[in-house]
């Protein structure tokens, strides 16, 4: 029997058009978790993240900012805010092209796995909303029901690749027959461990690497409200969160040809 395969998706700027964690800044302020000043600072960080790409220095600054920001937050309150506002905040940010691509992979029999440096409290509900089979996300240290500001597990850069390889060992995925999608050069290791990598809305350095390796370069441009624009797949009750340990934390191939290829 052939081994199972998967499609691994980065989240921020690959499935959704913003940083998933920073997207909740206004709601966290309304819930009494952050000040207006901190909310404005997070909005600025969102702007820098979206316009400047996400190199290692920027990701380190964002990781430090978010881990310091959430120190002392009540975990149950964070989860309640995310649960209550998820549809209003996230649905309008989801790329229609990403949802279509995930559905095509499902129809081809592949698992959908979201691999994100954002926090599990945000990524896991988004994964369930999108019908993902598994989620790999960053996890913050929790003591007495509150975040300490320290990170237990950071799903970033090479660690994403290690997490995918660990899944391949435990679930049995054939990585040579699997797919991966990301926008950032920081995820190049994740892309290299599968047989079918693709760059989505890539930053300059990832575009250069994708072109040199003849990887597909895809352009996702249509964030839509799912209920009005794209059918939302049913959330799976068996969503598995890979808690390998928080906050955060080719070239030129056309979209139509890529869609045809993954269905084969």
Image: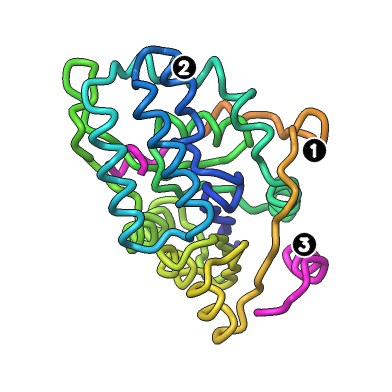
In this rendering, position of residue 210 left or right of residue 28: right
Give the label on residue 81, or none. Answer: 2
Q: Residues within 10 Å of mark 2 (few under 14, many from 20)?
A: some
**Vertical position of residue 69 compared to residue 48: above or below:** above
**Do the numbered discs 2 and 1 sit on residues whose CB atoms are within 8 Å?**
no
Give the label on residue 115, or none. Answer: none
**Do the numbered discs 3 and 2 sit on residues whose CB atoms are within 8 Å?**
no
- Label 2 residue SS: helix
In this rendering, the label closer to the viewer, 1 or 3: 1
Label 1: which residue? Answer: 230
- Where residue 2 appears, as percent x and y from the top left, is 60, 63
Q: Earlier in the sequence, mark 3 or mark 2?
A: 2
Disc 2/disc 1 C-alpha distance (Å): 25 Å
Q: Quadrant of the N terminus?
A: bottom right
Give the label on residue 263, or none. Answer: 3
In this rendering, the label closer to the viewer, 3 or 2: 2
Q: Quadrant of the C terminus?
A: bottom right
Disc 1/disc 3 C-alpha distance (Å): 19 Å
**Vertical position of residue 193 compared to residue 25: above or below:** below
Q: Quadrant of residue 219?
A: bottom right
In this rendering, the label closer to the viewer, 2 or 1: 2
């Amino acid at each position: 029997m052939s081994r199972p395969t998967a499609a691994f998706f980065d989240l921020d700027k690959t499935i959704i058009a913003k940083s998933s964690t920073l997207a909740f800044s206004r709601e966290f302020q309304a819930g009494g978790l952050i000040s207006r000043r901190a909310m404005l600072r997070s909005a600025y960080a969102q702007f820098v993240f979206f316009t400047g790409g996400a190199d290692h220095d920027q990701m380190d600054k964002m990781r430090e900012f978010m881990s310091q920001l959430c120190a002392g937050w009540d975990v149950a309150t964070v989860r309640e805010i995310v649960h209550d506002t998820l549809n209003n905040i996230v649905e309008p940010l989801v790329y229609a092209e990403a949802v279509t691509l995930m559905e095509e992979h499902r129809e081809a029999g592949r698992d959908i796995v979201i691999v994100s440096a954002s926090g599990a409290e945000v990524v896991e509900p988004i994964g369930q909303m999108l019908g993902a089979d598994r989620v790999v996300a960053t996890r913050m240290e929790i003591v007495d029901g509150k975040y300490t500001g320290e990170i237990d597990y950071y799903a970033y850069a090479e660690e994403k690749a290690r997490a995918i390889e660990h899944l391949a060992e435990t679930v049995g995925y054939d990585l040579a027959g699997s797919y991966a999608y990301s926008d950032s050069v920081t995820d190049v290791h994740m892309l290299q461990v599968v047989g079918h990598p693709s760059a989505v809305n890539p930053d300059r350095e990832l575009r250069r690497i994708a072109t040199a390796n003849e990887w597909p370069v895809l352009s996702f441009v249509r964030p839509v409200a799912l209920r009005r624009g794209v059918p939302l797949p049913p959330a799976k009750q068996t969503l598995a969160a890979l808690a390998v340990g928080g906050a955060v934390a080719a070239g030129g191939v056309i979209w139509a040809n890529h869609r045809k290829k993954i269905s084969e």
